[in-house]
Amino acid sequence: MASTLDVGNLLWAIGILALPLLLALPAKLLYQTVILGVGPTERNYRGTVQKILDAGMQVEQFREVLDDEARRLGIKPSRAKLNETDLLYPLTLTHFLLIPMIFILPVVAVISLPIIILGIPVLYLLEVILIRRRVLINLIKLLETWFGKQIIHIPDAGNNHCSNDAKVLDASNIAVHFHKVPRVVFLGLFSWLIIHWTLRLDSILIEFALSGIFYIFLLGVVGIVATALESNLVLVDPARGRIIPIADWLDSMLTPIVGVGLLFLLGRDLMSEARDGGNTILFSATVLLVLYCATAVGVTFQWGYAWWHGRTIRNKFEKQAIDKLNPQSYDLTRSRGRILLNVRCPMAERITGGIGPGKTLTFTDLDNLPTAHEGFLKSPENPLE
């Protein structure tokens, strides 16, 4: 069979698949140099924000002093906020692989529209099962009881950085939400490659339809769970000395499966087309079309569902977490090389904002973290007593 390998068409197909990468490199460079800026003022401001992040504090707690610093350096508020966002939620090369969708948007929109329309009732049904029927919080409770872990609450460094009340087209908010898009986009390509590999259907329309249904299900489960887990619940494994955000724990399981699966399925199908006399160029073009259709669906989900409805999901899940787990809220900070894990209050009090220094911290507080939290610390209960 190796003698029938069409090397010429295979190389063309690989070249087509490499086109997004060739476009992503200059796009990422343009974003970092022109939009974010690489001058001394931007570097100084980013260094200030990085100092906050290195200390384990929330950026919004220093909003007043950061605004003052931006004015002192002569940086526009929109660019200052965008640089903060880039440190909190960086856009990697993976994100810029999806940008070419803009150039074929009319075609992508026509193909993606049926999937988007069909996905609305599916998302609602999955939300009812996972959130309203408390399936997700019960599964998390099993982690705590069956596996001897403990669930606590540690606010993320970007907590409240992006608000639903802000302008939809605000550059920093767009960057925050676009940062979350790839985790659901590649599920679309993964779904199509599985259907294409396992069923080998003659009709590409039926293949698209089946893979679309499969994608909607995966998108709904992963998207809704990821949105709910933005509640900053953290899994603690005292026996192994580990502190893992549950959202990162989910990504750590999902990313290798989807990533390795994509590479395997893509390589296997491409070589199969080349050996069996198939059209490898058409296959590569179809892969890109599926990728950009999945991007359109993922963007629609992120802005049409997670943006407008995400807060409702998080609020419901937070209430369920408080009722079911009643976790304590901690600060995980670093001061002079020392890692400090300090219990602050129950999660319910932290969410209502009734305790803590709020948004009035200064860099003096940053340099004196233990004293900055005096009066807010509570001792945790001893589980052995």
Image: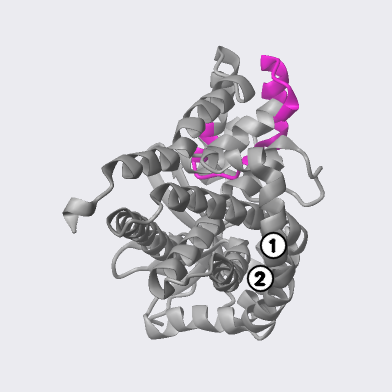
- Tell me if 123 is positioned left or right of 17 in this view: right
Snapshot quadrant of residue 15? top left
185 to 171, vertically: above or below: below
Q: Residue at x 65, y 49 (%)?
A: 177
- Tell me if 284 is positioned left or right of 179 in this view: left
Residue 276 is situated, as x and y percent measured from the top left of the image, at 30, 60
Snapshot quadrant of residue 324? bottom right
Q: Depth check: 182 or 12 in front?
A: 12
119 to 373, vertically: above or below: below
Magenta span covers which residues?
A: 50-78
Three-letter amino acid code at the position of disc 1? Ile
Q: Quadrant of the C terminus?
A: bottom left
* Color style of the picture: one colour
Task: State the SS at label 1.
Answer: helix
Residue 42's mark? none
According to the picture, the residue beneath numbered tag 1 turns out to be 351
Tag 1–tag 2 contact (CB < 8 Å): yes
Residue 318's mark? 2
Q: Quadrant of the N terminus?
A: bottom left
Mark yes or no: residue 335 visible. no
Magenta stretch holds residue 67? yes
Residue 243 is situated, as x and y percent measured from the top left of the image, at 40, 61
Mark yes or no: residue 299 visible. yes
Three-letter amino acid code at the position of disc 2? Glu
Task: State the SS at label 2.
Answer: helix
The secondary structure that most of the magenta stretch takes on is: helix
Q: Depth check: 337 or 80 in front?
A: 80
Q: Depth check: 199 or 224 in front?
A: 199
- Tell me if 357 is positioned left or right of 269 in this view: right
Residue 309 is situated, as x and y percent measured from the top left of the image, at 76, 64
CA–CA distance in space, label 1 to label 2: 9 Å
Q: Residue at x 32, y 55 (%)?
A: 267
